[in-house]
Image (cartoon, rainbow, N blue to C red):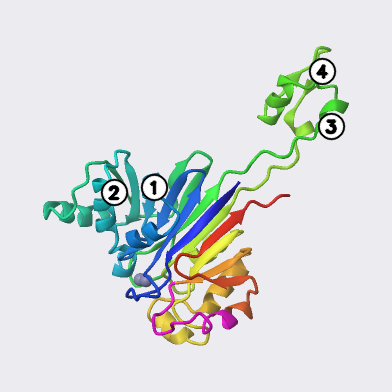
Amino acid sequence: MSVKLVFLGTGSGKPVPSRNVSSVALFREGETFMFDCGEGTQVQLARSPLRPGALAGVFLTHFHGDHVNGLPGFLGTLGLNQREESLAVVAPRGLRKWLRALRDTNILGTNYRLELTEVTEEGVVLSGDGYRIEAHALDHRVDCYGYAFIEDARPGRFDLDAARALGVPPGPMFGKLQRGEAVTLDDGTVVTPEQVLGDARPGLKIAYCCDTKPCDGAIALARDADVLIHESTYPAGNERTAHKRGHSTSGDAARAALEGGARKLVLTHFSQKHPGVGDFLPGARAIFPNTIAARDLMELEVTRREV
Ligand SMILES: [Zn+2]
Ligand SMILES: [Zn+2]
């Protein structure tokens, strides 16, 4: 079992043929979660192996065009596709007003329900079967939140030998212990799950940190993340310009990954003035070697750690 990431757009500012603007899709056990929805995202999605029908939620970091302009068209297409299930849309304050204006001007006609959440503080913004999504405040030019997709911890491994040694008969009692319930043997002995289960195994944490200059929220997102997707608008060495504009360099992204103890860093949101990723990678890898650069339609399989 794993989680798949598909990078739908990896550029900042405006779309160009080789790089669309921001969007990342996360696919897990039949459900898709979309982070940002820049212009043209639905075309990118159609070019990817993901199907929009499985979409469970859209999470917008902030109201800059390169992160949200694709949403109205995409929501309209879902309506044309006869979507019936409701869809969660999470974004900072302003979401309701924006969508109301689109409805009032007849631009947005959806026949399915939108479950809107305006993020006003850090915390869990959506939870489901075995996962939750947390928002962390970032430091950009407008209200901005990054998101972390966090799976619940899984029960520890079942120690067959320990169970046998304690006299637990194979069968339903094994299942009960695996589910975390104590069992009573025929002779009255009580066996608890702790006696036969190893330590709980952590689920995956995938963090999306976009757009921001270096800040505590970025470190919180990076904390123990299996994958940190971090904006890298400018190559390392351009910190002054980047920070003045509320952005990060590839070096800043690497420092956040290092400080937070992330396991892998994926750079994205590249300035379109730099068509290749060669300008971004060396400065990041010098600080955090396990860094890759996202490119449009890149797929990344993330597998759970075994401990
Ligand atoms: Zn941006
Ligand atoms: Zn922005």
- Label for residue 162? 3
Q: Earlier in the sequence, mark 4 or mark 1?
A: 1
Which quadrant of the picture is home to ligand 2? bottom left
Specify the farthest residue to the left.
Answer: 105
Dot 1 or dot 2: first in sequence order is 1
What residue appears at the point 58 percent right and 78 percent down from the top-left corner?
A: 284
Q: Residues within 10 Å of mark 4 (few under 14, many from 20)?
A: few
Q: Secondary structure at mark 3?
A: helix
User: Which amino acid lies under the numbered mark 4 shown in the image of this protein?
Assistant: Thr
CB atoms at circles 4 and 3 under 8 Å apart? Answer: no
Where residue 192 sits: x, y (%)? 75, 27
Q: Which residue is mark 1?
A: 55
- For residue 119, say whether it is visible: no
Mark 2 vs mark 3, CA separation in Å:
52 Å
Work out how far the residue at label 3 is from the one at label 1, CA to CA, in angstroms.
43 Å
Q: Is residue 271 magenta?
A: yes
Q: For the point 43% across and 67% down, which residue is it?
A: 210
Q: Which circle's residue, 3 or 1, is located before the other in the chain?
A: 1
Q: What range of the chain is rendered magenta?
A: 269-283
Single out the mark in the foreground, 2 or 3: 2
**Of pointers 2 and 3, the one earlier in the residue sequence:** 2
The answer to which of 34 and 288 lies nearer the viewer is 34
List the residue tagged with mark 4. 189
In the picture, measured across the screen, residue 222 lies left or right of residue 137, that is right
Under circle 2, the secondary element is helix
299 vs 305, nearest the viewer: 299
Give the number of the mark in front: 4 or 2.
2
Q: In the image, what residue type sits under mark 3? A: Ala
Q: Main secondary structure of the magenta part?
A: loop
Relative to residue 41, is residue 125 depicted above or below?
Answer: above
| Mark 2 nearby-residue class (10 Å; few <14, some 14–19, many ≥20) | some
